[in-house]
Image (cartoon, grey):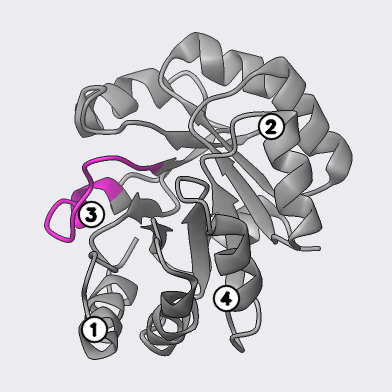
Amino acid sequence: MTDIHSIMTKAPVIPVLVIDDVDDAIPIAEALVEGGIPCLEVTLRTPCALDVIEAMKTVPGAIVGAGTVLSTKDLEKVLRAGVEFVVSPGLTENLGRAAKESGVPFLPGVATSAEIMTGLDMGLSHFKFFPAEANGGLPALKAIAAPFGMAKFCPTGGVSLKTAPDWLAHPQILCVGGSWIAPKGADKDTIRKLAAEAAALKS
């Protein structure tokens, strides 16, 4: 199994996917991979999310993870579905320690210095800054991250194609998370084009 640093450096953007229909899973995954975005975060916000994960895993080149993992119970479910990385909106000791013990690449959400310190105490060094814009945007993350040179980040929440380059220019930011690459109702060609634009962003 790879590590979270490798996942975060595969492409400048990790798409945050909320998929309501499992029949959409393979075409969306194919379009994203063909556009140069291989790491796919399927959020556990819909009843079919686990089926979507299993379907996307059949697409060559797709590295499929689960987002919105809130508990150890969620973690167990997504591990059984074969996810290759796990993303959480926050960090609890139970979830953090269970993820570490499982060996799965884990990207927990943080918004404060205390949360980063909690993660560092657990042996974690890579974090999702979430929700990025609502928590003060890039100026806030610069200030919060300054004492923690060893920490790396993936800002998610309100990041767009327009603002992503500013985020990616910061040396502690390896990638950004975004939902704009696969908007609801978009066809395969549109998603492929949006993915290619995202893949061309330079960090």
Kindly check if marks 4 and 3 are in contact, taking CB atoms under 8 A apart as contact: no
Disc with the residue nearer the chain's start (1 vs 3): 3
- Label 1 belongs to which residue? 187
Q: Residue at x 59, y 31 (%)?
A: 70
Q: According to the image, label 2 marks what residue?
A: 124
The part of the image, by quadrant, that contains residue 100 is top right
Which residue lies at the image location 43% right of the left edge and 15% below the top edge?
A: 112
> Which residue was labeled with disc 4?
56
Residue 142: quarter of image: top left
Which one is earlier in the sequence, the residue at label 1 or at label 4? 4
**Cα separation between marks 4 and 3:** 25 Å
Give the residue displayed 64% in from the left and 22% down from the top: 119
Mark whose residue sits in front, 1 or 2: 1
User: What is the three-letter code of the residue carrying label 1?
Assistant: Asp
Picture coordinates of residue 120 (x, y %)?
A: 67, 22
Give the amino acid type for the residue marked by disc 3 in the picture: Ala
Q: Is residue 161 magenta?
A: yes
Q: Earlier in the sequence, mark 4 or mark 3?
A: 4
* Secondary structure of the residue carrying numbered label 3: helix
The amino acid type of the residue labelled 4 equals Met
Asked whether residue 162 is drawn in magenta, I would say yes
Separation of residues labelled 1 and 3 (CA atoms): 23 Å
Q: 88 or 7: which is nearer to us?
A: 88
Circle 3 residue = 164
Q: Separation of disc 1 and disc 2 at Cα?
A: 38 Å
Q: Does residue 109 lie above or below 199 as drawn?
A: above
Mark with earlier residue (3, 2): 2
